[in-house]
Amino acid sequence: MSPTPTTPTLNALGREAAYQLAHVYKTRPQYGALTPRWLTHFLEFKGLETGLYRINRVVEGDAPLDALCSQDPAKVDIPLGFIPYATQPREIQLSSISTILNIDTRVADLYSAPYDQTAEQLDLAVESLRERQESQIINNEDYGLLANVADAQRVQPRTGAPTPDDLDELITKVWKEPAFFLAHPRAIAAFEREATRRGVPPVTVSRFGGTFITWRGIPLVPTDKLFVDGQKNPKAKTGKTNILLVRTGEAKRGVVGLYQEKLPGELSRGVAVRPRGIDDDGVASFLLTIYCSAAILADDALAVLEDVEVGEYYDYQ
């Protein structure tokens, strides 16, 4: 039998020993569940002083006020009248999203270079709350967008998959300065397939540092908070979801995000961080709270394409 070959040994310092003297570049903590949260970029926000937002509306008919329109100087009977207001307008109260964060002060003291442990923990906690805020703006049963779409603003797809015709139908519902579509990434991919199959592939546009496809010049904004069959990341190839079309801004009688201004311990917009003290074991505790809500100022500021199928594929051979 021939002898078993041996691995040659280098007469030099090995990697394991050299590693002990090497500097290692470290990243900040990478939190895989975080998303770009494009909705909070595209949606206009209104800061409140008291946590209350009253939507005053005019009681409208075909025209809010009669007027005289005539070139005949003999017609001088100018209509009289006034514009009535709703006597019981809707009031929206800000909701709170809270969590308590614990930090071992000994760990923070000893292991805060190059990154401050307390600051990193607070940053990740705030990012987590921001994710929940975006989800609540869409899905909250009280003030969420899906729960407050008027019946007349609900559209069903023609074939199941989201087609250019379906998005055009949404535009007829929100035709006064629509700002953006909002959809799950799989719904956007399904629409791209349908548009490409019809020979009208969507063009792209750059907004807020991101690239988005558009339809009729309106960007399709992705979010995983518009669930597919109730899930952010569905595993099945098929599934149903919704696509929203939104007009935003108080001046346009659109959809407005709400937050509380000038909070004690304000870390960022609408986020309060309050120290709760240090216990006998040296654990520091912080209360983090986001105050948020949303308001739809007019019914035609929002429309939804319901029960969109995301699993339609085609053979292009």
Image: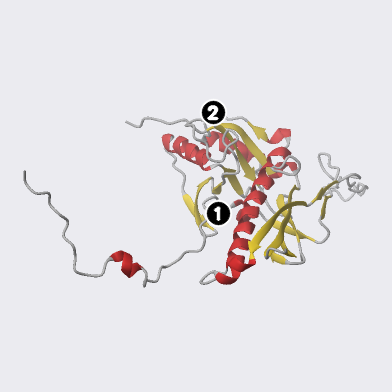
Q: N-terminal of the two: label 2 or label 1?
A: 1
Which quadrant would residue 126 be assigned to in this image?
Answer: bottom right
**Image label count:** 2
Whether residue 74 is situated above or below residue 147 in the rendered picture? below
Q: Is residue 152 visible?
A: yes
Which quadrant would residue 141 be assigned to in this image?
Answer: top right
Q: Which residue is mark 2?
A: 160
Residue 201 is situated, as x and y percent measured from the top left of the image, at 44, 42
Amino acid, disc 2 = Gly
Quadrant location of the C terminus in the rendered image: top left
Q: Which residue is mark 1?
A: 36
The residue that appears at 44% across and 34% down in the rendered structure is 198
| Left or right relative to 301: residue 15 | left
The crowd level at tag 2 (other Cα within 10 Å; few <14, some 14-19, many 20+) is some
Whether residue 21 is situated above or below residue 157 in the rendered picture? below
| Left or right relative to 132: residue 57 | right
Residue 46 is situated, as x and y percent measured from the top left of the image, at 73, 58
Quadrant location of the N terminus in the rendered image: top left
Question: Does dot 2 land on a helix, a strand or a loop?
Answer: loop
Q: Nearer the viewer, residue 162 or 200?
A: 162
Residue 142 is situated, as x and y percent measured from the top left of the image, at 76, 41
Residue 194 is situated, as x and y percent measured from the top left of the image, at 46, 35
Question: Does dot 1 land on a helix, a strand or a loop?
Answer: loop
- Real-space CA distance between mark 2 and mark 1, rounded to the nearest whole angstrom: 28 Å
